[in-house]
Structure formats: structure tokens, C-alpha cells
Image (cartoon, grey):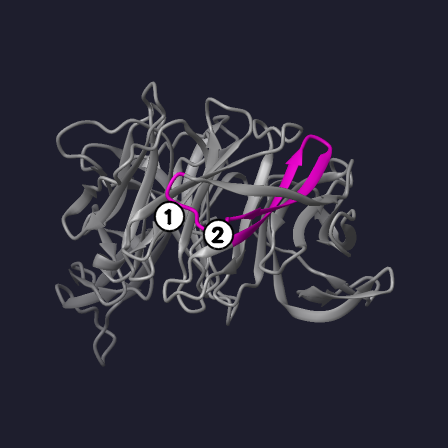
Amino acid sequence: MQDVMSGDPLRPSLSKNTVALFANPFKSGQTEALVILDGGELVHLERSAAGWVLAPVDREKKTMASEVIVAISPNGVVWGLYIARDARTTLIFVRLAADGWKAEPTGQTQTDWSNLKLVYTPPTPVRIPVVYGSRRASNDVLKFVYLDHDGKWCAHWAQMPSDSPLPNADISLYPAAVDSTPNSLPTRFRMTYVHRDEGRYFEVSKGLAVLPSQSWDVKNIGNLLQGNVVVATAAPIDRLALGVLSAGIGQDVNFGVFYSLGEGSTFKPFRIPLPGVPYFEQSVTFFDANQLAHVYGIDGGRTVSVLHQTGWEQGSLDGVGCLLPTWTKGIREDTKKTVYVAVPFTKEALRLHLDPFPDSSPTLLVVHWNSQQSDIGDLTLYTQDLLTGRWSIEPVRLASGARQVAVPCYRTQASLVDASGVPVPDYAMRLTARSYVQVNVAGTAHFLTPGSAVEIKTDRLGRVIFSTLASG
């Protein structure tokens, strides 16, 4: 059914890196986000008692940005990094405090940034965020920053080979080695590189003494399978990459594990066919706290599915032993055969935004497509408990007392009667929720969180009627 509820739809820009999810430590770890709106303004999508609201990042002036990500430091500090919409495409650093975002000077100004991405080092002994991208004014410079021993962002760069330009390339960086200091700073990365129909695998390593803004070395150590690699992600094991092998639009997915049999050799593919799952047109990969991969993809029918890695096993490729990931399996009803399973969980999806922080509960913001209006539809937060497999679903609409909109809702009606079956009017009670949800009671919107409650009363017929936003 439909009900009238207060709230405005949120319209993020559909460009890349326009939504950065994070758990707010000042609000008991509730999910919030930095969002770049249609016009380029960067805002904080946060929770209030009335629902979702937009707050400025800078209270004194409007913040304009082209890309944004959020990184979490080893001591739990939330950092926002965004590329300013200025002539120098400056990378700006802001830190979340209890009363909002604070600009943090980083010494040398970071200019000419584009194509932001984020990865975390392994958790032993501490997990450090690494933000990387490319130099906007150059075709062949890899740039990255990470937190040093003093908790300050330290900038580095690496010159790419002349035959491996970064514009229009899909790259994924993963720390392959760290030093022995208490902060475990990275000393070597592996990087997958896919440009059109060509894929390569690089080692990015530091010299004996690398100072801030000093160049690292880049070495080509192998080639990914050429001709049918759509996208690849560096995996948390040396010489291993994950990706989607093109089976053709509309055909079943062949998810691939790419493994190097030695330096300079072409990676060997290990195909993982996913029967019944159409080709992923868009995908994101989440590495959990145990460094297992979870791949979320949107197929041609706008359905979102997830493929979960369950562990590792010893295998072989071309007779050479190697460690390969294992994936969720199920039994097909028609053939009774065991097959790999990608589980669908929502439809009409347009974009996926992932909180990349490694934990046991991946969170995605799905931007839905409104087919009736041929436009952006609702936004929904999906959080999965990887231990139980259960999802929590929360629609995201901005709180607004001025605008009333008709939205799909679930309506609940309960009647309170006494021992004789007579309705009990005007009886006070409390309404609670186990997850974050917006409810509408007697025309008033309330935003419930776990542990909170709203006081309500039965009407003159002893009824309580309330509605919640439908998730699908």
C-alpha cells in the first residue's frame, strides 16, 4: 500500500566516488555518509531524531567536490578525503569530531588528484588505510597517501611505465608487505591494471629510504589474461587477483581467479561459473575482517547479487600447486548438481556504494532506478551479518516537514482489548525497533534506532496504527 510520509528523496551525483559510507563512532557506530549532490556540493548525510538530514561539511562556506572517500585510522578516527572542484584539483583532508568535520592541514598541498580508491593493510599488527589515485595532469603517475607513525598523512608517488597509461584504466592496489615497525607501514604493493582488453600485474616497492613525496619503483611482474578481462581486483595474497571474465552480455557470469605461476609469466585463469546469474555490468568487492572477498554485482536486469568467499584451499593450475579461494555453493533443483551460487537480494538497482572498512557486516547503499519516471529512485542501505547471512534493510529519505510524499509502506494495525474483549482507548504504550527505521504514527514521522522508543496511545477504538517504509 501507499502512505503519505514526510521526506525528500536524496539525489547524489551518479559520477564515481560520490557516496562514502562510514560508521560514526560518535553515534554508536550508526552508518552515515559523505555525499556529493547533483550540483557538486559535498554534504554530510547524518541521522537525527526526525530522520536523515544533510549537514554542511564546512559551516562557513559551501564545499564543492568531485570525488570523496572516507578512511578509518587504526585508532578509530574517521577521515574524509575529497577532491576540491578547483583549478588544481586539490586533495583535502577533514576529520570527523563530535561537533562536525574539521579541516586538517597536511603540510605540503596535494594537487592534481583524480580517480580515488581506498585499501587497508592487513590487520597485523594494525590496519592502516591507503588512499590512491592518479595525477590528473599526467598519464603515468600513481599517487598514494597513508598514515605515518605520528598519525599524519604521508604522500608518495610512482612513475608508471610509458606503455601503461592510467587514464581510462582500472587499477587495484593491495599491500603485499609491511615493515616491522609498530605501525606496520607498507613497503610493497601488488597492483592489477586493466586497460581496454589488456591486463597487467605490477609490483610497487619503496627504496631503502623513501621520504614524503619521493618516487617508488614500479615493475611489471606478469600479465593478466588478455582479451576478456572486464575488471580485476588485487587479492590479499601475492600473485593472486580476482575479476570477471567476459562471457558476453546476457550470458552467465564467469567469475575468475587469476594466479601467477612465476614472475614475468601470464596469469592463469581459474573460472568460477555462476549458473543463472547474468553478466555483471557493475561490481564492487568487499574484503572482510578475515580478508575474504564478497563480490556484489548488478546484472543487465538491474538485479543485485552477492558471491561470498568461504575460505581457501590448496589447488593446482597446470600442475603447479597454489592457494585458491573457495566460494558459496548450492544444489540446483533441476539437475541436483552442486554449483557456485551468487545470491540475489534486491532489484531495480542503478548504482552500488560500499563501505570498504573490513569488518563482519558489509554495508551497501543501493541507488535504485525508478522505471516509471525513468529517473533516480529511492536509496536503501543494506547491511549483512556474514555469520548468519541475515540482511537489515533501511530506506534513506531526507526528513522534511514541508514536503509530504506518497511512498510504498507496510501498515500495521493492532487492537488493545481488556479481559472482556472491550477495546481500551487512550492507553499509553511505547513503540520500539530492533533496527533503524522511520515510522509514521498519526501523521507524524519518527526515526527509531535500536534502544530508542516513541510514546504512543491507542485511539478511541483501542487501535494503534503505524506504517513503515517498504524496502521492496
Q: Position of residue 263 (x, y in %)?
A: 73, 52
Q: In the image, which is nearer the foreground, mark 2 or mark 1?
A: 2
Q: Which residues are magenta?
A: 188-213
Q: Position of residue 119 (x, y in %)?
A: 47, 51
Q: Position of residue 414 (x, y in %)?
A: 30, 64
Residue drawn at the location 44% of the way across and 63% of the way down: 359
Up the image or down, 402 lies above or below 323; here it is above
Residue drawn at the location 40% of the way across and 29% of the way down: 13
Verify CB contact (< 8 Å) between mark 2 and mark 1. no
Amino acid under disc 1: Leu
Residue drawn at the location 53% of the way across and 53% of the way down: 188
Which SS class for mark 2? loop
Sequence-first tag of 2 and 1: 1
> Which is the main secondary structure of the residues drawn in magenta?
strand
Name the residue tied to disc 1.
21
Determine whether, in the image, residue 235 is placed left or right of residue 445. right
User: 47 or 272: which is nearer to us?
Assistant: 272
Name the residue tied to disc 2.
208
